[in-house]
Amino acid sequence: MRFLPISFLVLSLAVTTLVTQPASALASGTSSADSLFERQGLAPDANTDTRALTALQLKFEDATIRGDVAFVSSVEDPTMTMVHGDRWTTGGRPQLADDRAAYNQRVASRAYYVHDLDPTSLRSELHRDLAICYGRYLSVVSKPAGSNAPGKITSIWFERVFRKLPNGHWVYLSHRTVHGPINSPAGIDPTRVAWTSTEAEQAKVPVNPPGAYALPPVSGANGGVPVDQDPTVSNSPEAAEVIAFQTALEDALVKGDSAFVNKAIADDFSMVHGDIWIRGGPAGRVDGKDDFLQYAATKHYMVRDNDHVHVEMHGDVAIAYGRSISFVPGRAATTPSQGWSSAWYERVYEKRAGQWQIVSHRTVFGPTYGSTREALGAR
């Protein structure tokens, strides 16, 4: 059983597949903002790669509900992982966590009545042989626990990572739910923000209106997957190497070591600030490599720390997630209440020519500001 909600017709009027940035968003970027905004928000029909990625994801969702394990397996990397529920975006446990075998078992058991990708929400970052796709799909589980009836329609907002093989085919590495599940009657998500929205318009859309969040409160059996049982968390020497590399890059930014920063950051790096994108909105600011070289040269940061860090390993690709804590003296001097900041993130690293480089950073929660480090609390 598969359907396309009529609500998509309404949504497509509000969010087109054209990449159109609000003037306010473009104005807030740096000298490289135009190309960076384009790179962090390519529409499904932007080029050959985005069309191929969109087609792959549509077929993947369709195969999921049909129980077509053969097709699903054919486009999954052996290391493919999937994290369900967004609690990890603030340091909590995921609702569920699958490796390839566990997800394929869901497919084989036909666990979903509906798994419909919303093309109007889909955007892609392209980084050579890597693609970072984000958007939402609508989901209806076949029989929720303790019930003989189908579940409710929910919106699942995600960040996915794909790798292009030498033969030109894309394979699925990772899925992480960044927002949701959100109860979405008739397919309409009450938390959705339009891609063309202004900051004033975004402020009118509630992040978590009453009754919207579909996950039960954290307790007992609903506590989520412990880290030591999470198949997406790697404790390998390679994962430790990535964490050490990430720490070295943060230290280099603080010390003003431009030579190390230049080697550590990929030329096609992009950093998406703010978390409005997890609900369909455009980033208010995007930094590239040149911006971080400038930050190093001017010693923009006095503190750059990370905590709650875990790593997924996918061969020469690593996905790190956790919380970044920063202190910016210049900002503290003008706006003391914003000198300190924290942001939860998902970062993608790739080993290129034997050297780890950071390719992408996306803020999944935040930023949170404070006048002191302690004021940031757990957020």
Image (tube, grey):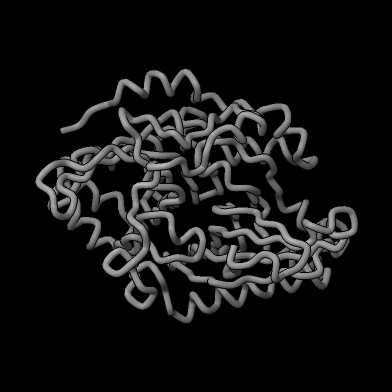
Q: How many marks?
A: 0
Residue 169 in view: no
Q: Residue at x 36, y 58 (%)?
A: 217
Question: Residue 103: percent from the left, percent from the top?
Answer: 25, 57
Q: Residue at x 75, y 63 (%)?
A: 340
In-front residue for pair 293/196: 196
The residue positioned farthest toward the left in the image shown? 148
Above or below for 111 versus 358: above
Q: Is residue 205 left or right of residue 72?
A: right
Q: Residue at x 73, y 30 (%)?
A: 24
- Quarter of image, res 20: top right
In-front residue for pair 277/126: 277
Q: Residue at x 53, y 58 (%)?
A: 346
Question: Residue 352: percent from the left, percent from the top?
Answer: 57, 63
In-front residue for pair 136/86: 86
Above or below for 144 versus 343: above
Q: What is the quadrant of the C terminus in the image?
A: bottom right
Q: Is residue 15 left or right of residue 358?
A: left
